[in-house]
Each structure stands twice: as C-alpha cells, then as structure tokens.
Amino acid sequence: MTTTLSFIIVLGVLVFVHELGHFLVAKATGVGVDRFSIGFPPKMVGFRYGETEYCISWIPLGGYVKLHGADPDEPADPGDVRMYSSRTPRQRAGIVAAGPIMNLAFSFILMPIVFMIGMNLPAFFESPVQVAWVVPDSIADAAGVENGDLLIQLGSREIANWEDLFEAAALASGDEIPLKINRNGEHFSVVVPVEELKSGNGLGVLPPLVPVIGSLTPGYPAVEAGLMEGDRILSVGGLPVSHWNEMAQIIHGSPGKSVTIEVDRDGTHQTLTVIPRLDEKSGRGLVGISPKNETISRRYPVIESISIGFKRNVELLGLTFKFLWDLLTFNTSLKLLGGPIMIFQVTGEVARAGISEFIAFMAFLSLQLGILNLLPIPVLDGGHLLFLGLEGIKGRPLEPRSREMAQRIGFFLLLLLILVVSYNDILRILTGR
C-alpha cells in the first residue's frame, strides 16, 4: 500500500508541475487552455472553472494541457486571438519549453529542502579512514594498501574521514595521484591511477562492516536455510569472519556447494547449511542477504543547503548527459535503463527510508523528466521545439506530411524505449537483480 500511494503521489506531483509550466506560460501569452488533465482519457473526475476544464483521467502515464487552436485539424479562426496557432514561433516555443523547464526548476527547489530536513548517511562517513577490507584486484590492492592502514591524504587534500576520501576521489585529476598512508605510525605514499579511481569500483577500500544480516531476498537460499534478519555471522565454511566482505567472498566462491554458516542469534549459536545459487551473469554464488547498515542524520543551515542542493543537481545533470552520451556511443548497455516498474519499486523503498530520501528521489526524477522531455524526439516537447526552430528558420511551418512522418517515427522510438525499459524491469524481477 505504501509503494502504491507513494508512486501515485510522485507521479501526480511531477506531472502536475510539468503541465503547470505549459499552462502558466500559455495564460501569460493570452492563449486559451481548453483542458488541464492529470492522466490520459477517459476522464475520471473533473470540473470547469472559467474557460478551462480541470480533470483527473484514468490512464496514469502522464498528463496534458489542451491549448486552444493547437490541434492542426481544428478549424482556424483568424479573429480568435486566443488560438495557439496565432502566436509567433518564439511564443509557442516558450509555451512548449515551460513544461520541462518547470521540472528542472522544481528539482532545484526540492534538493535544498532535502539537506535542510537532514540526509541519512552511513555512520562510518564521519570516522577516520581506517581500512577494514581491501577489495581483491582493486587499485588499492595493486598499490599495496593493507587492512588496518589509516589513509590520511589523497593528492593535496588531507583526509579526516570517509566523506573526505570520497570527495577527494571525485575531484581528482591528472593521470596519477599520490595516496599518503599511516601504517603503525610509519608514513609513506603510493601512487594510484586517477582514471581507475574515478571508475565505479573506486579506490577499493572499505570501512568496518560487521557481518550482521539486515535483510533477506524472498525466494533465495538464505530464506530456505533459515537465516534471519539480525543474525550475526560468526563463521562460514568453518572459517571465522569479522567483515561482511570476508563472508561474502567465501559465499561468492561457492556456487552450488553446501556451505555451513554459524550465527549468533540473540546470544545463542546456531549452525545452518546453505547452498549458494549460481549467478550466471557474474559467475558468483548468491544466497540473498544484505548487510545491516547504521546511519546518521545530518542537517545543514539554509544557505549551505541551497549551495549543496544546487551543486548536487549540477552533478546529476552532468552524470545524466554523460550517461546519454555513453548510450549514443554504445559505451554503456541498454540493460541499465529502468522504466515505470523499477520507479514503482524504488519509490516504495525510498518512502520507507524516510521523508528526505523520498524528496531527494522526487527531485532526481523531476530532473530526469525535464531532460527527457527536452530531447529532440518528435512527440516529446523537445521534438516540438525542433519543429518550431525549423519554422522560425524557414519562415513557415513544416509541411503536414513531413511533420506527420516525423511524429510517427518519434512515436515508434518512444514505444521502443518503453518496451526496452519494461523488458529490463521484468527481467530484474525474474532474476532478482
């Protein structure tokens, strides 16, 4: 119920904000608005106020503002000054662009609120960077970093805690960067490659993470074996473990094999047997457990929240455009795309995580919606802006036949995208990934 209600709220708010942009600019330029609808027909409920009918419709895949005279098949009335078609290309472009611009602006309004309310961060963020686990074959492993090392400087930036390390890694530049280490009171430096440092795997060092089960995935071997949330894993396959990744490494290397797991459950020791399931994509064994993560809440003053929120949105914009470019240049997989089903699932998760996570997710989606609608694909706002730009250059509208053909191509591309993301979403559900 929480997931469904949260999804309806998020979708309704974002669609309302988008259509409100079209509506307000249309009204400001004197264009009539016949209908303002959240959702697509058939109509569920509605009322009329002035010239406009306001309604909620049954198909929850978006919304629309019906502008007076925007339908090409609608008879033109030269004497009707309220008609959309009577406006200049620049005025019409302003109406069209207002929707996605409102979504972008909404994101920049919401994100600072997240930091004012308080962000839930991992508790280790404020701890000194005492390495508890070095990921095998990572750049830290290659550089000779060991468990127990205290990382104190990356490049020219001193590192007081894990948050400092992540920020220093994100800002690193050049080909290589020095990493200063304190090992049992002895200071020395190693050099790490920046390109790998800024990749998805990062430096390859992890903070302490006690192997306590935080959640289980239904249908996976851990549930069948009788493991429970809150279990503290003491040993796996007879080997004592003190870090989550130490335990995970043994599980990952034992697909299809019977493995004994000793746990501490409310002060009593129990020994269970589990057979890790083979993950065909990675070749690793999985049992379907996730660690228990301790979090802290951090609030920021108003001015600082505005600054941090603005920077965060700029970062997200950059990452989004990079992802789109990687898709176009075939440097990333279409499998990474998600659609309505994934959004539905994630909305429920963030709603249960807290109000700040929920608002942050809404801000992120609003940003994505704004960018998506500005893409120059016919049937999207960006496609209409492209047509209006060509009209402004040529001095006359595109031929109806050319416009109709472009709209059909755009609709086909959009339908293809919906099928791809829906396939990805369903595949994730079926495979548990």
Image (spheres, helix red, strand yellow):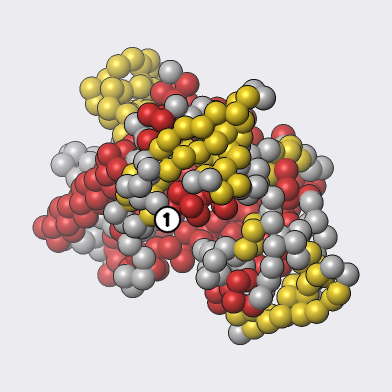
Above or below — where is 113 with respect to 330? above
Above or below — where is 395 with respect to 365? below
Q: List the single residue furthest toward the bottom.
A: 175
Q: Which residue is drawn at 77% across and 39% down?
A: 299
- Res 396 quadrant in image: bottom left
Element assignment for label 1? loop
Between 414 and 394, the one nearer to me in the picture: 414
Going by the numbered disc 1, the residue's amino acid type is Gly
Tell me the quadrant of the picture where the C terminus can be found.
top left
Above or below — where is 304 with respect to 157? above
Q: Can residue 284 be seen in this view?
A: yes
- Report the side of 147 relative to 344 (left or right): right
Q: Can residue 115 be seen in this view?
A: no
Classed neighbour count for the residue bearing mark 1: other residues with Cα under 10 Å, few (<14), some (14–19), many (≥20): some
- Report the side of 257 relative to 161 (left or right): left
- Tell me where residue 79 appears, x and y as whole percent: 29, 40
Between 97 and 346, the one nearer to me in the picture: 346
- Tell me where residue 2 appears, x and y as whole percent: 47, 21
Q: List the single residue furthest toward the left.
A: 401
Q: Which residue is drawn at 69% across and 38% down?
A: 295
Between 248 and 43, the one nearer to me in the picture: 248
Residue under label 1, please give it.
253
Tell me the quadrant of the picture where the N terminus can be found.
top left
- Tell me where residue 259 appears, x and y as whole percent: 43, 43
- Res 113 quadrant in image: top right
Above or below — where is 392 with respect to 112? below
